[in-house]
Image (spheres, helix red, strand yellow):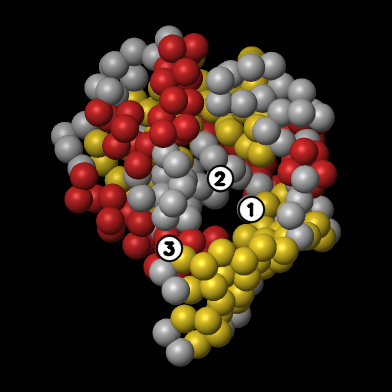
Amino acid sequence: MTKNKDWFASWFDTSYYHILYKHRDYSEGQAFLKNLIAFLKLEKSDLILDLACGKGRHSIYLNSLGFQVIGADLSKNSIKYAKQFETETLKFVEHDMRNPFKNKFDVILNLFTSFGFFEDDAEDIAILQNIKDGLNPNGMAVIDFMNSKKVVSELVAEEVLTIDDIAFKMNRYVKNGFIIKEINFDADGEHHTYFEKVKSIDLAKINSYVNSVGFKIKHTFGNYQLEKFDEETSDRLILVLE
C-alpha cells in the first residue's frame, strides 16, 4: 500500500502513525507552552485555537491551565479520540486549515511543524490568510516551524526503528524544495509506504508569505526556551504574528 497524495490526510489517520511516534516526550511541548503564555501575557479569558491539534494533548494541557480552547485537526480519528476530553471550555472539531474558520480567536497556535505541507505556495499563503482573518482585533498567532537550514544540514539519510514488533524503515532526502521522510514497513500482512513531506522554508520566504496577507512578524525565536533565532544553530523557527 502506497500513500503519497495529501500524505497527511492518510498517514495521520492511521494507527501506525501513532505507533511510530508514541514515545514522543510531550513535557518539552508543555514547557514551551508555559514559556509562550508568560511571554505573550495571555489571559484566562482568551479564546485559543490549537490548529492542527492532533489528538489534543496540548489543547488539553492549555485547558487544564484555565484557558478556553478549541482544537482543530484534519484527522477524523484524532478528533474522535480527542472528543472524550471535551469540557465546557474545551472543544474539538474536524477542520482543514485551508478553509476559513467559523469563530474568531484571541490566539491561534500552529505548533510543532504543522505548516508547509502543500506543493503550491498559494495554499500556504491561504492558510496564513485564514489565520489572520480568524483573529479578533489585537489577536496574535504563533507559527512553530523547523529551522529548515539546520534540518537539511543534519539530515539522517537512513534509520530503522522497531516499535511494537513493526520495523519502520525511514529514508530522508530533499527533493523539489521539500524535506521528505519515506516510511516503509510490513504490518497486518501487508507492505506499507507512507511519506512525510514538509516544505523547506527559510525565514526570508516565510516572511514574504506573512507580508502578503498583511501580517507582521513581531518576534522570532529559535527554540522552546524562546531564545534568539540563529539560522545556523537554532533548532526551531518560531514566529509571533500580529
The answer to whether residue 134 of the structure is visible from this angle is no
Residue 152 higher or lower than 209, as above or below: below
Question: Could you tell me residue 95's position as x and y percent?
Answer: 42, 51
Spatial distance from mark 1 to mark 2, Cα to Cα?
8 Å
Quadrant location of the N terminus in the rendered image: bottom right
Q: How would you rate the neighbour count of disc 2 (Cα within 10 Å): few for under 14, some for 14-19, many for 20 or more?
A: some
Q: Classify residue 171 as left or right of residue 68.
A: right
Residue type indicated by callout 2:
Ser
Q: Nearer the viewer, mark 3 or mark 1?
A: 3
**SS label for mark 3:** helix
* 118 or 4, nearer to the observer: 4
Q: Do tag 1 and tag 2 residues touch (Cβ < 8 Å)?
A: yes
User: Which label sits on residue 149?
Assistant: none
Whichever of callouts 3 and 1 sits on the residue coming sooner in the sequence is: 3
Task: Name the side, left or right, on which 91 lies relative to 237.
Answer: left
Residue at mark 3: 19
| Residue located beneath label 1 in the image | 117
